[in-house]
């Protein structure tokens, strides 16, 4: 495939969305065709699967069902949107991809990274990003950004959220140890402009590497 496939990973408050916007503007201003997407990416079958996943009524959903549905949604988004864009030669920027499942379902839902990778391998048929960027923002910094008012009274749900946040963060650190070549860490606690600059450098390096 002619294009470049870059996925972005991070916890809540990592600023992924704003960073992706900046990076998109930068490459478009250079005349590069950029496809920005996130799962389910407006693909109707994937959107329907997403509705099942997010329905708060579905309290009985089993963690393996959840993992399989994320993988199914990913498959459809990949074949309908990502692969055609890569075939055209686009730079594809995808907000979350397989590593989100490895961390959220594999680590947080305790299915195990290997088991979740296995079903995703079937879903993605070895189409992995050329580069995965983990925007590294420590949990307390990310949550402070989300809460905005750090001295607000912290309730039980907030505490659960912190616990969950720590687990996800630790999960990403483990993934980076496991896949040191595929996943690059971008220090994410600077300004959005600074972090965007680092991301742009990483993508330019990837492009030069293939030139
Ligand atoms: P979203 O609103 O897109 O969150 P964010 O802005 O943090 O990306 O919701 C995506 C949520 O779904 C997020 O909490 C991560 C979770 N998720 C999984 O559990 N597994 C997956 O495979 C993916 C892609 C997302």
Image: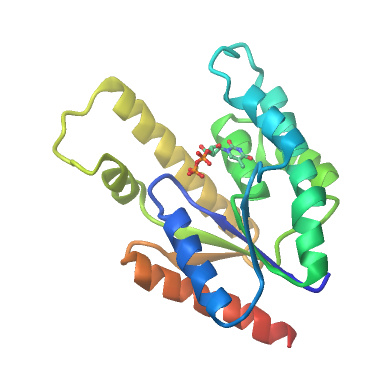
Q: Quadrant of ligand 1?
A: top right
Q: Quadrant of residue 48?
A: top right
- 129 up-or-down from 95: above or below: below
User: Quick check: 2 left or right of 55?
Assistant: right
Give the residue displayed 43% in from the left and 33% down from the top: 164
Residue 184, given in percent of the width and then of the height, sits at: 56, 66
Q: Nearer the viewer, residue 87 or 4?
A: 87
Q: Is residue 106 above or below residue 9?
A: above
Q: Work out which quarter of the rendered image holds the C terminus and state it.
A: bottom right
- Give the image location of residue 157, x and y in percent: 33, 23
Q: How many numbered marks, from 0 up?
A: 0
**Colour scheme employed for the rendering of this structure:** rainbow
- Residue 56's x, y, as percent? 53, 17
From this viewpoint, which residue is outermost toward the left? 151
Is residue 64 placed above or below 189 in the rendered structure? above
Give the left or right position of residue 192, taking residue 184 as reference: left
Who's the residue at 74% across and 31% down the image? Answer: 68
In the picture, measured across the screen, residue 110 lies left or right of residue 189, that is: right
Residue 8, horizontal then vertical, whole percent: 56, 57
Relative to 197, residue 171 above or below: above
Return the residue nearer the eye: 61 or 30: 30
| Residue ID at (16%, 33%) | 152
């Amino acid at each position: 495939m002619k294009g470049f496939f870059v996925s972005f990973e991070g916890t809540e408050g990592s600023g992924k969305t704003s960073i992706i916007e900046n990076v998109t503007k930068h490459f478009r201003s250079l005349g590069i065709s950029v496809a920005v997407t996130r799962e389910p990416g407006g693909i109707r079958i994937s959107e329907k699967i997403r509705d099942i996943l997010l329905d708060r009524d579905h309290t009985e959903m089993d963690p393996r069902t959840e993992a399989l549905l994320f993988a199914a949604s990913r498959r459809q988004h990949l074949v309908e949107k990502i692969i055609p864009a890569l075939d055209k030669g686009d730079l594809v920027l995808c907000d979350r991809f397989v590593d989100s499942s490895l961390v959220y379902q594999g680590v947080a839902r305790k299915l195990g990274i290997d088991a979740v990778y296995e079903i995703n391998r079937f879903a993605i048929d070895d189409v992995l990003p050329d580069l995965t960027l983990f925007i590294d923002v420590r949990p307390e910094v990310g949550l402070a950004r989300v809460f905005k008012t750090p001295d607000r009274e912290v309730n039980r749900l907030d505490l659960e959220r912190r616990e969950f946040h720590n687990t996800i963060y630790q999960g990403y650190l483990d993934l980076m140890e496991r896949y040191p070549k595929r996943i690059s860490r971008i220090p994410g606690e600077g300004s959005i402009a600074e972090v965007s600059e680092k991301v742009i450098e990483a993508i330019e390096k990837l492009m030069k590497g293939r030139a």
